[in-house]
Amino acid sequence: MSSKRLRLADPALRAELATGLDNPPGSDATALAAMLARSFGAGTVAIIHYGSHAQHSDARRESAFDFFVIVDRYHDAYESLARTVGTSFSPGTASLLNHVLPPNVVAVNDNSQMPPLAAKCAVLSLKDLQRECSLRARDHFVRGRLFQYVQLAWTRDVDAHAMVTNAIIDARVGTFTWGLASLPPTFDAEQYFRALLERSFSGEIRPERGGRIDALLGAQREVVVRVYDALLQQLGRERILEKRGNVYQLTNPVRALQRLRTNWYFRSSKVRATARWSKYVITYDDWLDYVLRKVARRSGVTIELTARERRWPLIFLWPKAIQYLRSRPQRRSDQ
């Protein structure tokens, strides 16, 4: 099944698949989104708010707010950011890295707020957003975040709003392709979403302890179950799924080739995600402290570093990193 097979022209169906996108963010996220739009300049297309602050799932005000910053051209966006807030990297370097392995992740602080607010920005061109939300996605980074509850915190104009909304709808419809092999024999919309979360998390190296899936499901249930109920109904109308009572099942069994493709997609995605870490050293200020704080908050594991490990982390931090990856809560819960 591909999103191209589904008949998605019905405005009512598309409105259901876009549920939640126009829900207003909180005041802090709104202020940050406006600041980011100014900082990245006139070529900013849209600001998408995602993650724990958007979902209200275990977020603290002092923790970074997560955004996708969608732009026309990378170099112009980074030149504007350097002029407005200052960067430790050159626009040319950041633009090159963004073309090689999108997105870049950069830290931007709004010091006009008290206390200052921090934004973690995944920077994507509109063209790359559209590709990474489609069946041509090169890895799971973008789809793995946008199939969940997100908000369009800022858009440049009506056309920008429509194009970004269409991309996110593609990401939500495309869940059936990469989630197909992980579905239980029968499922409703909530069970479908749970299967997506579990498959998505297993395909990334994450610091979360047990219970994170339940927390995410609880925080997003009201909005996201409505989205996937609409999708499952459409799949039923097109006889891709069969409805029995209040649950669905596949009309045809999952083929071995589909399972192989899905496994390869997630394996290659994990490789690309790991390679993306090397860019944080260049593009994300105070990246080491950010990682340590996130590990401590999500897993309850505090990693103490020596002066030598802090000074040359890429040389001397590997033993502790490997030890943590082998014993992290996510790995223990998967076994």
Image (spheres, rainbow, N blue to C red):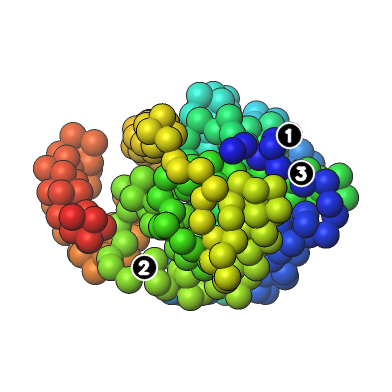
Camera sees residue 322: yes
Location of residue 20 in the rendering, given as x and y in whole percent from the top left corner: 69, 66
Per the image, the residue denoted by label 3 is 7
Query: Is residue 243 found left or right of 295 in the rendered image?
Result: right
The image quarter containing residue 40 is top right
Please state which of residues 84 and 293 is positioned toward the viewer in this rendering.
293
Residue at image coords 65%, 68%: 226
The residue to which callout 2 is attached is 212
The answer to whether residue 285 is above or below residue 51 is: above
The numbered mark, 1 or 3, whose residue comes first in the sequence reads 3
3D distance between C-alphas at marks 1 and 2: 35 Å
Residue type, mark 1 in image: Asp
Residue at image position (59%, 34%) is 135
Instruction: Give the residue type at disc 3.
Output: Arg
Q: Earlier in the sequence, mark 2 or mark 3?
A: 3
Q: Earlier in the sequence, mark 1 or mark 2?
A: 1
For the N terminus, the quadrant is top right
Number of the front mark, 1 or 3: 3
The residue positioned farthest toward the right in the image shown: 158
| Disc 2 residue crowd, few under 14, some 14–19, many 20+, Cα 10 Å | some
C-alpha separation, residue under disc 1 versus residue under disc 3: 29 Å
- Residue at (48, 75) in percent of width and height: 218
| Picture quadrant where residue 142 is located | top right
The residue closer to the viewer here, 86 or 318, is: 318
| Residue holding disc 1 | 72
- Camera-side residue: 139 or 277? 139
